[in-house]
Amino acid sequence: MPDKDELARRRYEKLIDRLESRMRAALKPEYQGYYGQLILSGDDLAELGDLKDVRHAAREAGRRLGWKTTTRLVGDRLFVLDERAVPEEIERLAGDAAAAAIDRARQQSLRPRG
C-alpha cells in the first residue's frame, strides 16, 4: 500500500491535471493560447480542496500551458489569469471582438420591449 506522501502527491498531480484541463477548455482558439483565465467559485474551491494547494496547482497548470500565471482571490472566487504580454495582432483581434460585443449589447438595449 502506498504511503501517505505518495497518496498526497498523486492527489496533487490529479488536481493539477483537472485545473489544466479546465484552463485549456476556457481558451478561445482564435487567441492562440493568450488571454487565458479560469474563475473558480466558492463551490469549486470547496470541491477541489485547500486554497493554498489549489493556488499552487493552478500556477503549475499554467506553467504547463506556457502562461505567466497569477491567482487572485476576490470574495469567495479564485481568478487564475495568464499575464503574459499579448502579441499585437491577437490584442487587436480581442479588442475588435470586445467592441463588437459592446455594440451588440448597445443595440439590444435600444430595441423597444414589447
Image (spheres, rainbow, N blue to C red):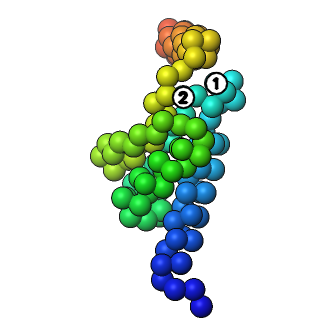
> Residue at the spot x=49%, y=28% of the render?
84
Dividing the image into 4 quarters, which one contains the C terminus?
top right
Contact? badges 2 and 1 (CB < 8 Å): yes
Percent position of residue 68, x then y = 48, 36
Percent position of residue 50, x then y = 38, 64
Identify whether 10 is placed above or below 103: below
> Residue at the spot x=57%, y=17% of the render?
87
Q: Which residue is mark 2?
A: 35
Any part of residue 104 in sight: no
Dividing the image into 4 quarters, which one contains the N terminus?
bottom right
Type of amino acid under label 2: Tyr
Is 28 left or right of 114, judged from the image as shown?
right
CA gap, disc 2 and disc 1: 7 Å
> Residue at the spot x=34%, y=50% of the render?
76
- Residue 2, picture quadrant: bottom right
Percent position of residue 105, x then y = 52, 16
Kindly identify which numbered label has been placed on residue 31: 1
Residue farthest toward the left in the current orientation of the protein: 75
Type of amino acid under label 1: Tyr
Using the image as rendered, state which of residue 2 and residue 49 is in the foreground.
Answer: 2
Percent position of residue 80, x then y = 45, 42
Using the image as rendered, state which of residue 77 and residue 88 is in the foreground.
Answer: 88
Is 53 left or right of 7, judged from the image as shown?
left
Q: Using a 10 Å C-alpha cutoff, classify the residue at mark 1 as few (fewer than 14 neighbours), some (14 to 19) or many (20 or more).
A: some
Any part of residue 106 in sight: yes
Kindly identify which numbered label has been placed on residue 86: none
